[in-house]
Amino acid sequence: MIMAEPVARNDSGASAPVDEEVLVKRARGGDLEAYDELVQRYQERIYATVYHMTSNHEDANDLAQESFIKAFQALKSFKGGSSFYTWLYRIAVNKTINFLKQRKNRIHMSLNDLDFNTEHDPDLVAFISDKTPRREASLSELQDKLNAALMKLSEPHRLVVVLHDVQGLSHEEIAKVMDCNIGTVRSRLFYARQQLQAWLSDYLKPT
Amino acid sequence: MNENQSNFEPLRRLLAFKRHETPPPGYFNNFSRQVMAGIRAGETGAEAEWSGRLLASMPWLLKLLQSFETKPVFAGGFATALCALLLFGAVMEQRPEFAAQAMLQPPPAQPQQVAPLASATVTALAEPVSQMMLAENSTNPVINFQNASSDSFGQMPVSAQFASFPIGN
């Protein structure tokens, strides 16, 4: 299973806004079944965002669950000015950033395994064999390096990279989630990419 | 921006590698269940918090409940007394004539048992006032100040004597 593909517009609320609206309305009235449906709809994306921010499965599990619980408790304050998933993302992102600030300088990576598709992804295999300085470099080593480089970024810069380059959110969506303007998102993304490029230069030889 | 995008293309492809990091198989099967359990636990926690506050505000209730735990006999006795009370209530309810009579009948007049000194004082004070109220009509003053003043000074006769102080021999 490939997790957190670039946001599929089908289930982000665009194709079935009525369904989501109904579910949110029912959940606001205390209907746990409706909220369960909402959780199942967004659990993978919320988990993935938190996981890529923390590089730790256990932390991501706790934070993602707490985010959903907090969202349910705060559902009465959801006015519907933005889509539910943007609001949910904001809760998860704020919770994660607060957690990371408290845990500053105590980074402990607990990475998930790579899925079966990794070794069969021709794009990725070609990339590794062509671009890595040591062809024997294993996928897990690359995974470690990549995560370590991401963790060196500040939280706002890491968040922009994760949401855009890993999760596939647009600049506009990221601006809504981070509650800032699009220009800020673009400049943060540019700076973060520059930093990552410098740190991962061994793996990124120019074509 | 397009130039920048193309410059970062290898990096973007490398970052796409992150998408292959997945949690253990079946992880998401239980995820929503755990969230729901967390929500229910939170609600239970709120209820527990409420009952905790109640017990804190009534320490006697806490002692009573603790005594039930430590002394089951006490709990049994309490339960028996409660049952007896309920039974009594139920029996009394089935006898409406008794309940109606109890409500309609005035309480039996009980003889006033007042201390002799107090009753005498009350009688002594009440009699002159009642006589006065009956004798005088409502436009007259309640108390006859002339009589009152003479009576009071009559009881204390005033007498004067010359005083003489011998000076020398």
Image (tube, coloured by chain):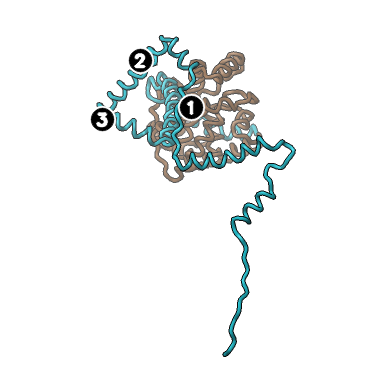
Residue shown at the point (48%, 41%) measured from the top left: B118
Pointer 1 indicates a residue of which chain? Answer: A
**Nearer to us in this view, A137 or B80:** B80
Q: Nearer the viewer, mark 2 or mark 1?
A: 2
Q: Where is residue A172 in the image (x, y as percent from the top left)?
A: 64, 29
Q: In the image, is residue A67 above or below residue A154?
A: above
- Same chain check for tags 2 and 1: no
Q: For mark 1, what is the residue?
A: A69
Q: Nearer the viewer, mark 3 or mark 2?
A: 2
Among the 4 quarters of the image, the one containing residue B131: top right
Q: For mark 2, what is the residue?
A: B87
Cα separation, mark 3 vs mark 2, equals: 25 Å
Pointer 3 indicates a residue of which chain? Answer: B
3 or 2: tag closer to the N-terminus:
3
Identify the colour of chain B in the image. cyan
Residue shown at the point (61%, 23%) measured from the top left: A83
Q: Position of residue B40 (x, y in %)?
A: 44, 23
Callout 1: few (<14), some (14-19), or many (20+) C-alpha neighbours within 10 Å?
many
Q: Position of residue B47 (x, y in %)?
A: 44, 27
Q: Is residue A118 left or right of residue A184?
A: left
Q: For mark 3, what is the residue?
A: B71
